[in-house]
Image: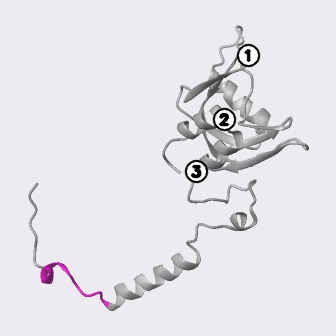
Amino acid sequence: KFTKVYPERFTTADEGPDRKQARLRMEAVLETEGLRESEADRTGDERSVERKMDKRLYLLLHQNGEWRLPQAAYVPDASSTSVIRDSLSSAVSASCGGDLRVHQLGNAPLAHFESGGRTTFFWKMTVVDGAVEVARNDDFAWLTKEELASRLGGELGDLLREICGPYD
């Protein structure tokens, strides 16, 4: 690959006063308001989506004494033309409250996990709007992929770390 190298005196320029003022103003804004650390990070509030803003967050529910992803059993209805996509939306509503609106990404599961004679399929969804509502004795947390994997642990944690992808 050939590239032409020009003398430095032709490629560098002094910063003009307007550009310098704009740069300094932008640096000040980024220093004060552009921080990716929120009040939720400072207080350790895992129930807020306003935490770890430089990473992707995944929803984990604490139900019946254990942490797990939102889930429901799939019961096919022969008399219905409903598809799994509709069942997934109703499962999210049932486990996370009717206020949380999500959008399913893709038509196929990302992965499956077999344990104790049961197979669990994982679909990727993104939150569109709303908030999580859980029963009185239950809890939820918005976790990074590493927090999610360590909270669930074992083979399931390893699988989730892998299917969450290389992105933070």
State the extent of the magenta-drawn residues as a range.
8-16
Residue 100 painted magenta: no
At x 76% / y 46%, what residue is drawn? 132
Viewer-closest of 5 and 72: 5
Q: Is residue 154 above or below residue 145?
A: above
Say if residue 97 shows up in the picture: no
- Numbered-mark total: 3
Q: For label 3, count other residues whose C-alpha is less than 10 Å away and answer few (under 14), some (14-19) or many (20+).
A: some
Q: Is 25 positioned to the left or the right of 75 in the image?
A: left
Which residue lies under the disc numbered 1? 75
Give the CA separation, mark 3 to mark 1.
31 Å
Q: Nearer the viewer, mark 2 or mark 1?
A: 2
Viewer-closest of 84 and 152: 152
**Image quarter of residue 78:** top right
Q: Amino acid at mark 2?
A: Gly
Q: Quadrant of the N terminus?
A: bottom left
